[in-house]
Amino acid sequence: MSDARDALLRRVDAERERLVRFFQDFVRIDTSNPPGDTRVGATFIRRFLDANGIAHRVIAPQETMPNIVATIEGAAPGPHLVLNGHIDVFPVGDVARWSHDPLSGDIVEDCVFGRGSVDMKCGTTASLFAFAYLHAIRDRLKGRVTLTIVSDEETGGRWGSGYLVENHPEVLGDCVLNGEPSSRYTVRFGEKGIFWLRFRVKTPGAHAAYPHLSASATRIAARFVLELEKLEELRPETPPAIARMFARADVREAMERGLGRGAVETAGRFCVNIGVLQGGVKVNMLPGDCVIEADFRLPVGLSRARVLEEIRAIVSRFPEVTFDEPPETIDATASDPDHPMLRIIQDNAERVAGVRPVPVVTLGGTDCRFWRAKGVPAFVYGCLPDRMGAPDERVPVAEFLDVVRVHTLSAYDFLVRA
């Protein structure tokens, strides 16, 4: 290992307390989305950048959802690496289901505890510190590093990474490294596509004693939901390279260990989730209105256009149901699994954490899809997604520090090996 790489690892070790304290303080800031107001979280990050002498700018197409962009220019020409993370997190939900305050940031059983610790304040902290460490040795680097810390990831990215990629081409770069949860067993080079639809069932409504006067909107909704769920029988045209990946024993084992039993099958199939179902006013009234909000996850090889065609066919059989056509969304995306950055991440993870992560196309969506859709390779390495979005979300301190180390070394290697 080179002297420079040794020095980077020594710095992480020397700043262990500072790193953990920053992570805890970050978790203590409520950046729940909805509502998605991340201004306090963004100010916290900006203070860190200012304290490290790092110039940056704020790009905020929505005032309450600022994005922070900073750039390092190396001493010689070379590749352009983008480090990407987000500030917003899932809502806390029912506080009574948590064993500790979800905004405490406390260390419980050697884990940093709280909402957003996994998704993705662990990874965003890793990006920030990796960027700061590279900034300190910028005179020894080639190329450029751009930091993009964004808002609005949890509600689609329209005002965050999606906005930056479409309106600020200087953030595109040659490669993206992202710290969303992946587990130490996997490095993500692709992910399923996602889009959301809101359906409305409308009938006249009536007193429950007079069902001859109106159909029930909730009863129609129940039948309609069953039809939507039948779409899970759609089969993708999986590219041969992806199919071979899913068939590998080491990939299957790693995905099951890192993402839970059944992860391989879930990654390769179309999934429908009815996240919201709201209807009715009173028990003795026939509901005249019902709202259905559905989340659709598309595997590689199944297009949004094909799914929408099937959905329109279902809606045509339910005259009481309407929906708005969704804005343009991105199908499932995948980068080259032989890209040098993937190998760099694997090598560093194996050295640091003792496990060589296997390359996978995985389940949840990340902002990497915006870069991949523009032809920019993007890769994800982060903590275990255990309890992500659930009560008692938490990240082991040792695992958090390993993510920082892997991101710092991988970013450095990508630049100096060019």
Image: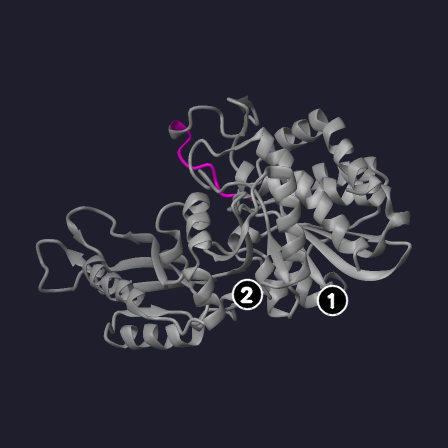
Q: Position of residue 394 (x, y in %)?
A: 51, 32
Say which residue appears at 52% left-offset and 54% top-offset: 155
Is 280 in front, or is 86?
A: 86
Say which residue appears at 48% left-offset and 41% top-offset: 91
Drawn side of residue 162 relative to residue 328, left or right: right
Image quadrant in which the C terminus is located: bottom right
Say which residue appears at 73% left-offset and 39% top-offset: 129
- Which of the numbered marks, if any, corresponds to residue 68? none
- Residue at mark 1 to residue at mark 2: CA–CA distance: 20 Å
Total tally of numbered discs in the picture: 2
Q: Which residues are magenta?
A: 89-96
Q: Position of residue 398 (x, y in %)?
A: 59, 30
Q: Is residue 309 above or below residue 5?
A: below
- Which of the numbered marks, if any, corresponds to residue 169? 1
For mark 2, give the secondary structure. Answer: strand
For mark 1, give the secondary structure. Answer: helix
Is 233 in front, or is 205?
A: 233
Residue named by callout 2: 334
**Mark toward the start of the polypeptide (1 vs 2):** 1
Q: Magenta: predominant secondary structure element?
A: loop
Q: Position of residue 377 (x, y in %)?
A: 64, 64
Q: Which amino acid type is marked by label 1?
A: Pro
Residue 248: image quadrant is bottom left
Image depth: mark 1 or mark 2 in front: 2
Q: Which amino acid type is marked by label 2?
A: Ala
Is 156 in front, or is 268?
A: 268
Q: Is residue 38 visible?
A: no
Q: Residues within 10 Å of mark 2 (few under 14, many from 20)?
A: many
Q: Position of residue 58 (x, y in %)?
A: 75, 51
Q: Is residue 342 above or below residue 352?
A: below
